[in-house]
Amino acid sequence: MTSQTSRMKKTDPANFDEYARRFPDATQEALRTIRTIIEDAAPDAVTRISYDLPAFAIGGKVRIWFGAFESHIGLYPGAAAVAAFKDDLAEYKTAKGSIQFPLDRPLPSKLIAKIVAFVVRAS
């Protein structure tokens, strides 16, 4: 017996470009910017899709995720990174392991690079 779910076409993104194409141009630009920041700060990291989000693996384990939402870009560097940069992140909405960067403001490139460098050192 075939269920309706098994007949449905899989729509999970296969790579970053497929993921980014789902969003408006300005959001795609923000996604590309954050990807470049992470690549520059973690040149040995490997890009992949994990939990349907763009992610970077360091030392074989995914350490950083990011994704687009209606009004923000979410960065998921883990609880230790968010705690370490608590003061720098005061103007952004955060949770235990996540940060929200509003789409109507420029991405804080230097801060993101510092957070990524922290994650790389901790890996």
Image (tube, rainbow, N blue to C red):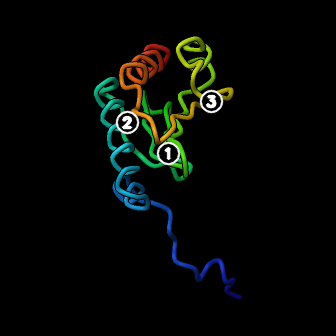
In this rendering, the label closer to the viewer, 1 or 3: 3
Residue plotted at (46% across, 49% down): 49
Q: Is 52 in front, or is 101?
A: 101
Residue plotted at (31% across, 28% down): 44
Residue assigned mark 1: 67
Measured from the top left, where is residue 87 in percent x and y?
A: 58, 11
Question: Few, some or many C-alpha atoms within 10 Å of disc 1 (few <14, some 14-19, many ≥20)?
Answer: many
Please, is residue 39 above or below residue 2 in the view? above
In this rendering, the label closer to the viewer, 3 or 2: 3
Please, is residue 93 above or below residue 117 in the view? below
Please, is residue 102 above or below residue 94 in the view? below
Q: Which type of secondary structure does the marked residue at label 1 adopt?
A: strand
Q: Amino acid at mark 2?
A: Ile
- Residue 19, located in which quarter of the rendered image? bottom left
Residue 93 — which label? Answer: 3
Task: Report whether 33 appears left or right of 98.
Answer: left
Residue 34 — which label? Answer: 2
Residue plotted at (42% across, 24% down): 112
- Disc 2 and disc 1: Cα gap in Å? 10 Å
Do tag 2 and tag 1 residues touch (Cβ < 8 Å)? no
Question: Few, some or many C-alpha atoms within 10 Å of disc 3 (few <14, some 14-19, many ≥20)?
Answer: few
On-image quarter of the N terminus: bottom right
Q: Amino acid at mark 3?
A: Lys
Residue 46 — which label? Answer: none
Q: Earlier in the sequence, mark 3 or mark 2?
A: 2
Residue plotted at (41% across, 31% down): 107
Q: Earlier in the sequence, mark 2 or mark 1?
A: 2
Q: Amino acid at mark 1?
A: Gly
- Residue 100, located in which quarter of the rendered image? top right
